[in-house]
Image: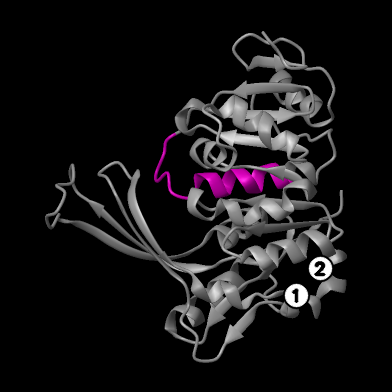
Amino acid sequence: MGNKTVIVIGAVNMDICGRPDREPRMKDSNPGTVSFSPGGVGRNIAHNLCLLGLNVKFIAAIGDDVYGDSIFESCTKLGMDMHLSRRMSGGRTSSYLYVTDENGDMLVGVSDTDISASITPEYLKAHIKEINEADAVVIDANLTRETVAWIAENVTAPLYADPVSAAKAERLRPALGRLTAFKPNEYEAMSMTGESTSLFAAEALLREGVKQVFVSLGDDGIVAASDGEIIKLPCVTTEIANCTGCGDAATAAIIWRSQRAWHCRKRIGCHEGRRNVRRLLRNDKPRAVPGTYKLIRKNSALY
């Protein structure tokens, strides 16, 4: 298979992470480590797609400050084509400040991504021919609702989206009926749909027109839903360095898988389990494999 081209339209920011050495004490100063690294949902997805061997073009708004220079250089070194990104004279590059617990699980975050509003319909219109030549287009909810609606109406390539957060996920509603796949986490999915469980939320998103829904459940795995069937897959056991960005990596994996032939030779997990995911995405009937997944619903009947 030749390398496919994916265009990612979304946010890039400088991540500033504070991680305490031991269990944090609220409303107090905690000894620990503060680190800086390029991040942002769109950038993280693009980074993972590069690592997976796809050709990636990244469209983001970046300031002309020190953070912006560092981010632009790092993205280029990773292999991203940045010629469609917008450098904003006098603009303040997005930043994301978050604090984790001693194990690396995020406790709270604050995002400053207003510059992403500079990716407007007018800006994208000038590049629509190149965008529609891509094999897939990915957007994140740091874009404005107006821009998301324009993309849904004008982009003809297969469309994927990441909700970023429950607070921003609603911006994606104009595009739901155009999405090939959508991966919210459990909280985002329930917030968008008003449902009380990940299962019902996945079904509600299918009714909105999303073709494939993947609801991540943290260390409890993922619910994967397509027309007529929903399965639950467990997590792969591995050593975790930091949970931040796991959802972005999962989104990239879903997009990567959709761009590959079904006869992938690399062993990613249980062989039969992998076949079942393929069958799910093709809307075929999965086979029962104990311990690999749980068939939750079929044709709206509880199993």
- The reply to whether the magenta stretch includes residue 156 is no
The residue indicated by pointer 2 is 131
- The reply to whether the magenta stretch includes residue 248 is yes
Q: Which mark is residue 124?
A: 1
- Is residue 52 something one can see in this rendering? no
Tell me which amino acid carries mark 2: Ile
Q: Which residues are magenta?
A: 239-256
Question: For mark 2, does the 10 Å Cα neighbourhood hold few (<14), some (14 to 19), or many (20 or more) residues?
Answer: many
Residue sitting at the far front? 194
Q: Nearer the viewer, residue 282 or 166?
A: 166
Badge 1 element: helix
Q: Position of residue 222 (x, y in %)?
A: 58, 30
First in sequence: mark 1 vs mark 2: 1
Residue sitting at the far bottom? 89
Q: Please report contact status of discs 1 and 2: CB closer than 8 Å, yes or no.
A: yes
Question: For mark 1, does the 10 Å Cα neighbourhood hold few (<14), some (14 to 19), or many (20 or more) residues?
Answer: many
What distance separates the C-alpha of mark 1 from that of mark 2?
8 Å
